[in-house]
Image: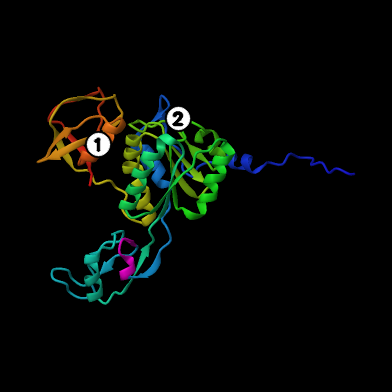
Amino acid sequence: MAFFRHTTPVKDETEEIQDKKLPIEAPETVNGVRDFWQHWDYLLDMVTELAEFGVPILDAVGLTLNESIQAESEIGTIQPGETVIEKGTRVTPRMLPLLAGMGILKVMARPSPRVLVMALSDQAVPASYLVTAQAQQVGAAAHRLEYIAERGSQLVTSITEQLVRADLVVTIGGLGESGTDLKEVADQIGPNDFTPVAISPGRDHGFILAEEKIPLLAMPADVYSSFVLAKLIGEPMISKLMGASTDPQMPSAYLAQPLRIQTDILTCVPASVKDARMTITGRPSGLEGMNLIYQANALALLQSSDGVVNADTEAFYLPLS
């Protein structure tokens, strides 16, 4: 029996993936930690908009317009040629009579992104329900799956088999709290980045460009960390896929009490905002923390160079509904 021997080594598929790099140059770090807002820009730059398609206006409700709607004739104070509805606006039922009255029965829109949320450990299951619902609330067609892998190869196979049904994958857990560590097999899924980020909670999360095209956001199992990362990163990713604005709408209010926080870390805490006054309601953990998240109407975003935030300081927040 004859044997054929290669004269040069042949790379296997895993080695080829490991040679791939993310398409955007990573921001610099300070002591191994990356600034959150630089990290935010970096991740959003790697998410591409979904393809547009023509859709009847009744079927477009909830989708994002990929064209500005301009007046062809005078509409009140709006003159011909002026924009009536901006590109990137989500279609609502109240728009339909306006569109129909203008003779527009079909619009160019982007579809609802398909978001797959995967719980990779028992500890991650509560957070997976929350993150799936958050994705649905901002317009995604979200699906939740629980998968606990005993071996890294099983985890890789499970994730890659699901990519055909997702425009965005969000994994919860599987970052070392139990079982297989996603970080150890990430190179087999696609180019990735698990650099620590200056945000609390949620410092340790990651990004994989699965098969070099599908964004995968890897979140920790902790409910509050995943809630914060879904609000600040996951929801803008969904908006980017839909062609909508990704800029966070952050009103401000004045703190009712002084606080001490970590130096130079974007610290996110639940708050109650009323009459431009912001009261911090606590730092969530466990079931009590889940109740704090439920009761809050704002997510305060605090940062300080010396760790001190005084009372009456103006602070930004994300409204919660």
Which residue is tagged 2? 177
Which is more N-terminal, label 1 or label 2?
2
Residue 83 seen: no
Residue 101 seen: yes
Asked where in the image residue 50 lies, by quadrant, the reply is: bottom left
Query: In the shown orientation, is residue 244 left or right of residue 318?
Result: right
For badge 2, the amino acid type reads Glu
Which residue is tagged 1? 291
For badge 1, the amino acid type reads Asn
Mark 2 or 1, closer to the camera: 1
* Residue at x-position 43% and y-position 36%: 122
* Colour mapping: rainbow
Query: In the shown orientation, is residue 307 left or right of residue 277?
Result: right
Q: Residues within 10 Å of mark 2 (few under 14, many from 20)?
A: some
Q: Which mark is residue 238?
A: none
Q: Position of residue 224 (x, y in %)?
A: 32, 35
Question: Judging from the image, what secondary structure is the residue with disc 2 in?
Answer: loop
Q: Position of residue 181 (x, y in %)?
A: 51, 33
Image: 59 above or below 256: below
Write down the region rendered in magenta. 57-65
